[in-house]
Amino acid sequence: MSALNLPRSADAALAATALPDYVLDYAPLVWLHSEDRYRPSGIVEHLNHVVPEVDYNPIEGVQTPLTLDNLSQLNSMGNESVYLTSEEGIDADPQPDWIFGTDIDDNGQANDVSSIIVVNDHGDGDVDAFYFYFYSYNLGNTVVGMEFGNHVGDWEHNMIRFKDGTPQAIWYSQHASGQAFTYDATEKQGKRPVAYSGNGTHAVYSSTGGHDHTIPGVDLPVGFLVDQTDQGVLWDPASGAYAYNYAADTQTFEAYDSSYPVKWLDFNGKWGDDALQGGPELFGQAKYTGGPNGPKFKNLQRDKVCPSSPCIVLPFKTWDAESTRSASASASASATPSA
């Protein structure tokens, strides 16, 4: 699929609602890594393959099947201690087909709803638009021949801070932290910023190449824990996404279209298995870790574009694969003695 000819293809149902046009006009496009087996996943499909557990025991009395309309029932059955545990187990070998997600068509749209948009209007001209991306599996980085940090369920996001409808800055979530850039600093297709998804981990970056995240929020091209990004498959998450307004004063969500399920956003539990008991470890870090909380836990009410302070908004994009190669070549040339 051409990186230059992809139009804004947001779902018509979205465009017909009160969702601000600029939220779709500037919605990020995401390059999935060419070798990433774990694609965006249908949120509903994920629920078809999990059993809610607390302390590794299935919860009794759960209304089944689990749906986006009844998921929040689990809050009264364990609250944040609930884990949506995969039927096959976090260490299943071979892994089941559903864990690999859904296909992306030639228009960049996922075949299942794999993303949501959440809008928080601060009321002073500042509007935050969160673009959440869901994957059924996170493949951790490989260190000394072993993966670690693998988990079922994975929520990543970009957030754009708008002022009077004009984009000011964008946040890229990356593991325990992330990075913020001015809108002008980011790569774009038309006026839509481009994001790059880490191979397996799905951490979101502003450029291609290697990204060391050993130090949270510090993106270096080489290091101990390195994500890789490239221009593999171009995904348009806004196309077909569910979209919601978030009222910070009441911490409640309202769907922009009556067909979008909304109760599931109140779910307080985890979107994957608990950490594997007695599983492999490396340097004290587990290979199989617990799944994450959902979008409501991503600090939807922020003073700045970052979820915490200090908030450094970079006015330039960090290096990409090409600039890193160029810098390395220049350094090698400088180190070569002249004849």
Image (tube, grey):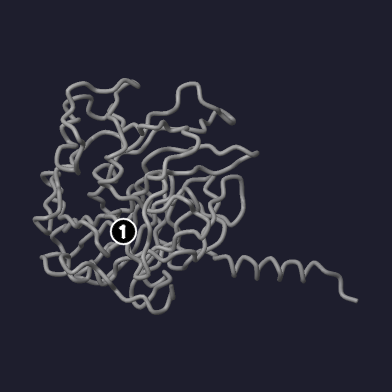
Q: Viewed as shown, does residue 206 lie left or right of 319?
A: left
- Give the amino acid type for the residue marked by disc 1 in the picture: Asn
**Residue 26: quadrant of the picture:** bottom left
Circle 1 is placed at which residue position? Answer: 111
Q: Is residue 198 above or below residue 175?
A: below
Q: Nearer the viewer, residue 329 or 51?
A: 51
Residue located 35% across and 48% down the image: 309
Q: Quadrant of the C terminus?
A: bottom right
Q: Identify the image quadrant of residue 211.
A: bottom right
Residue positioned most to the left: 258
Q: Label 1 crowding class (10 Å Cα cut-off): few <14, some 14-19, many 20+?
A: some
In x, y percent, where is residue 321? 58, 65
Q: Which is nearer the eye, 186 or 107? A: 107
Q: Specify whether 118 is left or right of 308.
A: left
Give above or below for 236 relative to 44.
below
Residue 278: percent from left, percent from top: 50, 21
Which residue is painted at 27% across and 56% down in the image? Answer: 130
Asked whether 45 or 69 is in front, the reply is 45
Q: How many marks?
A: 1
Q: Is residue 59 above or below residue 240?
A: above
Residue at the image position 18 percent from the left and 56 percent from the top:
120
- As drawn, 35 above or below 280: below
**SS of the residue under disc 1:** loop
Q: Residue at x 20, y 35 (%)?
A: 65
Q: State which quadrant residue 87 falls in.
A: top left
Can you give x and y, in whole percent of width and height, for residue 217 in the image?
46, 50
Task: Locate residue 305, reporting x and y percent.
Answer: 31, 57
Q: Quadrant of the N terminus?
A: bottom left
Q: Among all residues in the image, which is located at the extreme right? A: 339
